[in-house]
Image: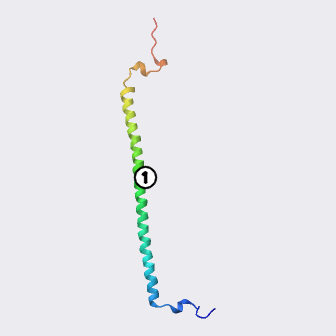
Amino acid sequence: MRQGSGPKWTSLSRDDLIQARTALRQQRVELETRHGEELQAITDRHSRERQELEAKEAKIDDLESVLEAFAAEYLQSEPVAEQQSPTELPITLH
């Protein structure tokens, strides 16, 4: 080893430790801030996606209601002869 290039720990002071601790605390604050922002972004995206899925499900529910109303109005009120298949129609012989 060259002279003057010995271990650095021999020249550490209490102020060096305080600076290192302060730097770590600042990094932790930055990490927590970034983490909060990322969580908020994920929460916002999740909320948007959930709303989109609920809107699609509501459209399906609406379609089902319309189809049920159509069937109730137009398919249930047909005359009996029209509801039966040709093989079920009564045959009258003269």
Q: Name which quarter of the figure residue 29 lies in.
A: bottom left
Rendered position, 29 above or below 57: below
**The C terminus lies in quadrant:** top left
Query: What's the residue type where badge 1 is placed?
Result: Glu
- Front residue of 13 and 47: 13
Q: Which residue is painted at 61% across and 94% down in the image?
A: 3
Q: How many marks?
A: 1
Locate residue 4, reporting x and y percent: 58, 93
In the rendered image, the residue lying farthest to the front is: 3
Rendered position, 89 above or below 17: above
Rendered position, 73 above or below 51: above
User: How would you rate the neighbour count of disc 1 (Cα within 10 Å): few for under 14, some for 14-19, many for 20 or more?
Assistant: few
Q: Which residue is painted at 40% across and 37% down in the image?
A: 64
In the rendered image, the residue lying farthest to the right is: 1
In the rendered image, the residue lying farthest to the bottom is: 3
Locate residue 73, reporting x and y percent: 36, 28
Q: What kind of element bears circle 1?
A: helix
In the rendered image, the residue lying farthest to the top is: 94
Locate residue 89, reporting x and y percent: 45, 16
Which residue is tagged 1? 49
- Front residue of 1 and 76: 1
Locate residue 62, reporting x and y percent: 38, 39
Q: Name which quarter of the figure residue 90 lies in.
A: top left
- Front residue of 60 and 17: 17
The colour mode here is rainbow
Rendered position, 93 above or below 78: above
Q: Which residue is painted at 45% across and 10% down in the image?
A: 92
**The N terminus lies in quadrant:** bottom right
